[in-house]
Amino acid sequence: MLDAPLAEADSTHGVAWTRKDLLDTDTLTRAEIDLVLQTARGMREVRSRPVSKVSTLRGTTVATLFYEQSTRTRASFEVAAKALGADVVNLTASGSSVEKGETLIDTVSTLEAIGTDVIVMRHHRSGAPFLAARHTSASIINGGDGTHAHPTQALLDLFTMVDRLGSLEGRKVVIVGDVFHSRVARSNAWALLKYGADVTFCGPPTLLPRYFVPTVDGRRCTMATDLDEAIEDADVVMALRLQKERQRHGLIPSLREYISRYQVNPARLRKAKPDALLMHPGPVNEGIELSPEVAHGAQSLIEAQVANGVAVRMALLYLIAARSRV
Amino acid sequence: MNERLVVRGGRVIDPARGIDGILDVLIADGRVVEVRPGIDVAPARVLDARGCIVAPGFVDLHAHLREPGFEQKGTIATETGAALRGGFTTICAMPNTRPAPDCGPVLESVLERFQRDGRNRILPIGCITRSREGRELAELAELAAGGVIAFSDDGNPVADPRLMRNALALAGALGLPITEHCDSPEMHGQGAMNEGAVSERLGLSGQPAAAEAAAIARNIELAAAAGARLHIAHVTTRRGIEIIAEAKQRGLPVTCEVTPSHLFLTEDAVSGDGPEPAYDTNAKINPPLRTEADRRALLAALDAGIIDAIATDHAPHAIEDKLVEFEDAAFGISCFESAASTLLTLVARGELRAERMVEALTSRPAACFGIDRRIPGAGRLEPGVSRDVVILDPSAEVTVDPTRWVSKGKNTPLAGKLLRGEVRAVIFDGMLAQEREGAHV
Amino acid sequence: MSAARYLGPEEMSRTIRRLGHEIIEANRGTGDLVLVGMLSRGYPLARRLAAAIREFEGVDVPVGSLDIGLYRDDVARRGAPPPVRPSDIPFPIDGKTVVLVDDVLFTGRSARAALDALLDFGRPARVRLCVLIDRGHRELPIRPDFVGKNIPTALVQRVRVRLSETDGEDAVYVYGEEAASA
């Protein structure tokens, strides 16, 4: 008998995924996010194969439940679920029992009763997926809730940045636009701060948070109203979609003024680091938050974001459906 | 019927008469007969109140009974039963019923229901405007003649300043106060909670503190110009209190109330204690739970007497009204049966003095709406006149369990919370109406 | 739990060289030969086999890596999701002779998963299975073509191959009661 390492010691995975739901990035640990990104790398490789589909989740039913219009997020999840061999049911608020006044909890219970394992949910009300998650044993993945959170977008953005930049420690990420109403900005901030990035929120004062500053381990988001200053030496510039009704609600004087002060255009992008990454969660209002040259320019990662979205959503579906239930 | 009852050895607090000491209270023939040490009469039932606070029956300036029109949320029978259980022997019923008491005949039918089903004394509050819609005035004089104690459109602040000015002039001439929910909805739309760090964190629409303060300031100016009495319903903000304090310094007939919910809880109750935000719809109330700084300012103003009364804003809702997305959920907290325990918990923590708590639940609200003139002895323990007594055990440890409540409204953010103090017994109309043992509220 | 070292570095090296010879012999050379190592320890073994073949034949045989996490038949039954890593097969496998390389052959379920995974990359002319250790107890009709060592084991025992690339040493251990000794 010889001295030998313990048999269990060479387990290859550090952290086990135990979460039933994915509701936001704020409570995810760095190790959990690492696991998502690592798994997504494997999924991206699957997508590059001649047969870009596996049957790992065969027998798993994934429902997309969308109370708000969305083509890309829903399609991205559907492709991701099918690429893993899951069955997919698509429900939208219009043309379903939701229109007949069925409550969210009843809808979710019904989906559970017909054997749905994972519900991907988008809702115009902040917190709706949290309500659903408490009332079903099916897993809930938040596909965007009101102005609160959009964790899968944040994780795909993070995946894209880490893919290009390696470590994000000390990297400057400027998120510009309607931060106040942006679930993308908020969920991105949590994830980026956990990865050591310096995050700046930039926009007109009426579209910035006034009381709440995302903070992780003492690292706080910086607030800025002058994009020309904020963009200097940025490693990543992420523009947010501007809802055109913001003008009607008196939050911005005019699109013209907004464009002149906050549009990311070639002149402004030149103030960032030379190879700064340009990102946008889509869909882009070309000519408003991004000038067309920039949107389609060499620094734009918008298409990579969309492609990576499938891999990251595959990773999340896989981890949640195959999670440890001990 | 002629049973005599001695409440023995409790700390009797009767602010109206300046009494605070260990005394006995004799109740007979439906009234408080004597308040003094060492009462020894026989035969009599004796209630051992050592270690307890003995106070006049509570007077609530702000309650929602839901009937007629919303019986799934509560009925006059269930909600007045809940009130009695919570020590509230006289309550003012807000007019947000369907139909709303905006004219004599509706008021009359509501009063008939109160008479038939009420388990305590109910005083009606009449509408300011027709159907509480803020467009045309209600028939204020007819409502006054029918017996309303005040006017209010409850959750609908009167937006039109000219209409408010006229309403104040008419109410002032009738000698009745207007009790106003002070908010400026045009400043925020329909904010679901306090505008601040928590609303921004959770992505919820917010009501800025400025919307309350601006409405308070406007209504005080209008009331002063009209020479009318104005009662500010459920003040929640530090700035609101400062404006009210200034009006009081000027000698204006302005009074105000605060709810136990706003004294006890902050906006943090919406997000809850867990790692994931709770979006607790049971903590959704209008005006919203504010910040800790506001809560401390409310406690200080209550202590200083700037805030006159503690009013429950008891707002029962059916389960389905709350089991929905936060911004779609109804506003309101069912409060009658937890009010005393939350307030006594504040006393136990040293955040509120017991004598001030009793005053704000009894003599001061009675004075705000002139209730003591309508109901002789209300809000005090006057021998030969007063009829209601509450006995509080400030040291009991209780867990809030709304499933045991009489109220139909189980909507409380305090479910499962451990509180200090409870209502031990309630004497209504000279009769022992409630007596409780046990560790649940 | 007791543990016995079954194989040391020198013997492992000899075994790998022997396996390399056997593969060349069976394939009659290196024509159309590719090696695909299963993650995590089959891949470094495949690279060592390729190095050995280069030594004997002077030819670089392509080496790829294959992750089978998504092809396991126990994904939903395990305590935790198996880790998923990118596979890397940067060459076509159509019409090739693919030698799948793994460290330990046990129930045969990993080999089954690897076959499914491999076929998503193309259509090889033939697939061969090469393992460093065969410990028996097959649950599926899988048979290795090249075996480094057969270790008779009891079902409760565990076999661990440690490689300098992944674990800092070259050794094979058998854990559990009544460990067979070398």
Image: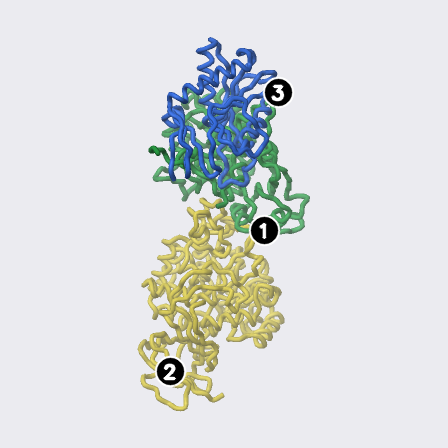
Q: Quadrant of residue B111?
A: bottom right
Within-10-Å neighbours for mark 2: few <14, some 14–19, many 20+ = many
Q: Position of residue B21 (x, y in %)?
A: 31, 77
Within-10-Å neighbours for mark 3: few <14, some 14–19, many 20+ = some
Residue that mark 3 sits on? C123
Mark 2 lies on a secondary structure that is strand
Which color has been applied to chain C in this rendered view? blue
Q: Give the colour scheme of this rendering.
A: by chain
Mark 3 lies on a secondary structure that is loop
Mark 1 lies on a secondary structure that is helix
Please identify, in this view, whether the residue under mark 3 or under mark 1 is nearer the observer.
Answer: 3
Please identify, in this view, whether the residue under mark 2 or under mark 3 is nearer the observer.
Answer: 3
Q: Where is residue B428 in the image (x, y as percent from the top left)?
A: 47, 78
Residue A72 in view in this figure: no
Q: Quadrant of residue B387?
A: bottom left
Residue that mark 1 sits on? A105
Which is nearer the eye, C14 or B78? Answer: C14
Which is nearer the eye, A137 or B213? Answer: A137
Chain letter for the yellow colouring in the rendering: B
Q: How far apart are marks 1 and 2 (CA)?
A: 53 Å
Residue that mark 2 sits on? B25
Q: How far apart are marks 2 and 3 (CA)?
A: 98 Å
Query: Along the horizontal axis of the image, is C174 left or right of B407?
Result: left
Query: Along the horizontal axis of the image, is C7 left or right of C80?
Result: left
Which color has been applied to chain A in this rendered view? green
Q: What quarter of the picture does the C terminus of chain B occupy? A: bottom left
Q: What residue type is labelled 2?
A: Val
Co-location on one chain, circles 1 and 2: no
The residue sitting at the top extreme is C58
Which is nearer the eye, A204 or B347? Answer: B347
Co-location on one chain, circles 3 and 1: no
Q: Which chain carries label 1?
A: A
